[in-house]
Image: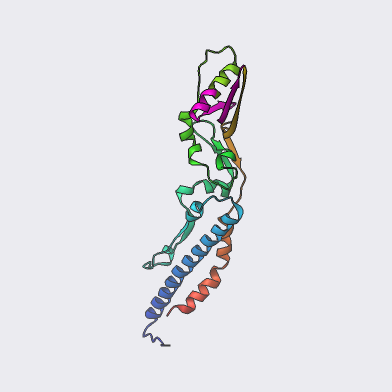
Amino acid sequence: MSTKIFSSLTQVTADVHRRFVKTGINTVNIVAATARNNAVRNVQRNFTLRNNFTTKQIQFTKCAQNVKQLNQIKSETGITEKAAYMERQEQGGMHKNQNGNLVIPTTQARGGSNAKKVRRSYYYSNIKPLVVRGSTNFKSKKAAHVARAFVAAKIHGFIRMNNSIFKVTSFRKNGNNVSFKSTHILNLKYAGTYTPKNAWLEPASAYAAQMMQEIFNQQMDKIN
């Protein structure tokens, strides 16, 4: 261990400032990283995740090591714009589609489990061209509905009923008797949905902040 010898108060002040800045940089970086790790755990524990996309978007920015002033020391923890939907989870609030009603996939669109991703073939952009509109030249709505179902069954397409989209899986005709089966794929009923507040970032950051003084003291002891 070496001992520093200073020849003036100016040198002492400069060295103290240097140590405080260096310690401050290390401290905020550790706290931000800790907050990020806590946030990831909160999201994994409290939300249904179908892949690791959301947790990968939870990131922190490091304070640069070349910072010279205390008021320049800053490190932040948050989530990227790619997962901006998590802000609504953090704060709660309404979710609306500016271009019309929301497109909400059903459990069937996820292969029978809400823990799974929506099948690509059931994305609305892929379904929309296959929704059978049909002709209006029918004596009854029932006849028009059956006609659309018949065409949908032939092209492996879909029909729309009461602001919902169904995939026609089979169609049978026996004389005058007609029957078909369909599966509910998309719900188009709602103009918006309300998301209750389920904070995941604030508690993670608050917990990390409680450790700041201890981390600062530890880092101060390491600076020469």
| 153 inside magenta stretch | yes
User: With respect to residue 32, does 193 lie above or below?
Assistant: above
Q: In which quarter of the image is the C terminus?
A: bottom left
Question: Tell me, what colour scheme is on the image?
Answer: rainbow
- Identify the residue at horizontal 54%, vertical 20% (top origin): 147
| Highlighted magenta segment, given as a residue range | 150-175
Which of the 4 image quadrants contains residue 40?
Answer: bottom right
Q: Which of 90 and 142 is in front in this view?
A: 142
Residue 196 at x, y percent in the picture: 62, 45
| 58 inside magenta stretch | no
Q: Residue furthest front?
A: 175
Which of the 4 image quadrants contains residue 106?
Answer: top right
Question: Can the viewer see residue 164 in this picture?
Answer: no
Question: Can the viewer see residue 7 in this picture?
Answer: yes
User: With respect to residue 42, does 31 lie above or below?
Assistant: below
Q: Quadrant of the N terminus?
A: bottom left
User: With respect to residue 107, does 58 lie above or below?
Assistant: below
User: With respect to residue 155, does 5 lie above or below?
Assistant: below
Which of the 4 image quadrants contains residue 38?
Answer: bottom right
Q: Nearer the viewer, residue 190 or 29?
A: 190
Residue 160 at x, y percent in the picture: 55, 27
- Identify the residue at horizontal 40%, vertical 74% (top origin): 18
Residue 192 at x, y percent in the picture: 57, 35
Numbered-mark total: 0
Residue 156 at x, y percent in the picture: 50, 30
Q: Which of 109 and 74 is in front in this view?
A: 109
Q: Is residue 210 left or right of residue 10?
A: right
